[in-house]
């Protein structure tokens, strides 16, 4: 039983040499193979986010051994969208392992973002009859639409984790804080910073729906997207990287505190509550909190981020590592997989470190 982790670089995608050893040229393709492949596609700059992508990578890295399958786990992680699309095309044309020539009996393509279906669409005619697709962070409607777009029928599946429970807890903490300070809890809404505009990305994390039920203002008026092209890490609007844009948007949220404080004469008690859903650009938001030392005025909840006990900053962790490992293990065992699998706070796949008591003395 062998489990291989192979990073596809652009050179590997073109020449199929990136993961070979000196003995590979001597390998003879197997006549009968039970080799299966799990290929995971990451967006440019996505890995290293200390959150969602890194947890997905952890799930890929912990694929468990089975009694019946030889698993080859690989990833696509290119520098830009064009290279990613090229690697996807190379993957669709492959029929065997570039490590030892073994023919794949089944392949699973894990797309970490639903918009990646568009990148795969032009190559759909090259997909094999035994290929299957798993969409992460997708809804049932997304899965059905992808199946129709790619012509794969029931071979497209979805896996998602809702953060609704944590968003409700964050709003409850905000209202509790304003009760302690005897201020109007609706004087400042919760601001949501997204990496992409809703025209670019259909978010399926339940943040928008949950905020709509707890906020007194329309959601569009408090959402601040920073990137307008899927998969990119550069803001055409702000003419800076996503990291820099995140830093500046947090500064805008911070300025709102002073505007409201001056109007309401609250003597510095008012805080602005911000949800940061920026992926790898979350680091830009974190740098703002650290460098300006304003994390006691901007109370931030970061989606898909690890806990940071050095500042008053809260985090939500979606355990996609465990969810993906569990899902792929069943797939490897040839268990018929459902159209959609949904998790959340109710089954422990979404956790947070929200603690209202930390706000009592600030």
Image (cartoon, helix red, strand yellow):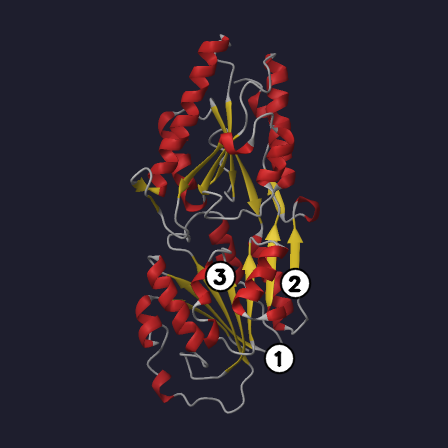
Separation of residues labelled 2 and 1 (CA atoms):
24 Å
Q: Position of residue 140 (x, y in %)?
A: 63, 56
Q: Residue at x 64, y 27 (%)?
A: 172
Looking at the image, which residue sits at the far right? 346
Q: Nearer the viewer, residue 168 or 66?
A: 168
Q: What residue is disc 2 on?
A: 339
Q: Residue at x 53, y 65 (%)?
A: 149
Q: Between disc 1 and disc 3, whose residue precedes?
A: 1
Q: Up-down: is 122 above or below 25?
A: above
Mark 3 Cα shell of 10 Å, populated few (<14), some (14-19), many (≥20) = many
- What is the quadrant of residue 15 in the picture? bottom left
Q: Between disc 3 and disc 2, whose residue precedes?
A: 3
Q: What residue is disc 1 on?
A: 68
Q: Between disc 2 and disc 1, whose residue precedes?
A: 1
Q: Secondary structure at mark 3?
A: helix
Taking the image as drawn, is residue 302 in sight?
yes
Q: Position of residue 243 (x, y in %)?
A: 36, 41
Label 1 with label 3: CB-CB less than 8 Å: no
Separation of residues labelled 1 and 3 (CA atoms):
30 Å
Taking the image as drawn, is residue 300 in sight?
no
Label 2 with label 1: CB-CB less than 8 Å: no
Residue 117 tag number? 3
- What is the quadrant of residue 169 in the picture? top right
Which dot, 1 or 3, sits closer to the camera?
3
- What is the quadrant of residue 355 in the picture? top right
What is the quadrant of the N terminus in the image?
Answer: bottom right
Q: Secondary structure at mark 2?
A: loop
């Amino acid at each position: 039983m062998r489990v291989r982790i192979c990073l596809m670089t652009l050179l590997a995608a073109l020449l199929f040499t990136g993961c070979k050893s000196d003995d590979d040229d001597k390998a003879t393709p197997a006549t009968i193979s039970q080799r299966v492949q799990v290929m995971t596609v990451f967006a440019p700059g996505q890995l290293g986010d200390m959150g969602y992508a890194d947890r997905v990578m952890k799930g890929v890295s912990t694929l468990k051994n089975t009694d019946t399958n030889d698993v080859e786990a690989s990833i696509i992680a290119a520098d830009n969208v064009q290279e990613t699309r090229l690697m996807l095309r190379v993957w669709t044309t492959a029929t065997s392992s570039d490590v030892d020539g073994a023919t794949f009996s089944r392949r699973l393509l894990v797309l970490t973002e639903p918009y990646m279906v568009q990148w795969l669409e032009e190559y759909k005619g090259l997909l094999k009859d035994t290929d299957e697709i798993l969409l992460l962070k997708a809804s049932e409607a997304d899965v059905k639409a992808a199946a129709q777009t790619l012509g794969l029928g029931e071979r497209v599946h979805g896996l998602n984790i809702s953060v609704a429970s944590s968003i409700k807890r964050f709003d409850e903490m905000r209202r509790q804080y304003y009760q302690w300070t005897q201020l109007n809890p609706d004087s400042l809404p919760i601001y949501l910073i997204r990496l992409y505009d809703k025209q670019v990305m259909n978010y399926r994390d339940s943040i928008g729906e949950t905020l709509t039920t707890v906020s007194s203002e329309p959601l569009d008026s408090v959402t601040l997207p920073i990137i307008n092209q899927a998969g990119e890490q550069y803001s055409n609007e702000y003419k800076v990287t996503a990291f820099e844009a995140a830093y500046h948007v947090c500064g805008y949220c911070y300025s709102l505190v002073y505007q409201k404080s001056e109007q309401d004469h609250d003597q510095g008690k008012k805080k602005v509550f911000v949800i940061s859903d920026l992926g790898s650009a979350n680091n830009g938001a974190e740098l703002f909190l650290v460098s300006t030392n304003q994390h006691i005025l901007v109370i931030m909840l970061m989606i898909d981020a690890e806990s940071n006990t050095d500042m008053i900053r809260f985090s939500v962790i979606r355990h996609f590592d465990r969810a993906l490992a569990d899902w792929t293990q069943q797939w490897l065992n040839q268990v018929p997989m459902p159209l959609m699998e949904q998790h959340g706070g109710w089954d422990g796949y979404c956790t947070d470190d929200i603690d209202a008591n930390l706000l009592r003395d600030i």
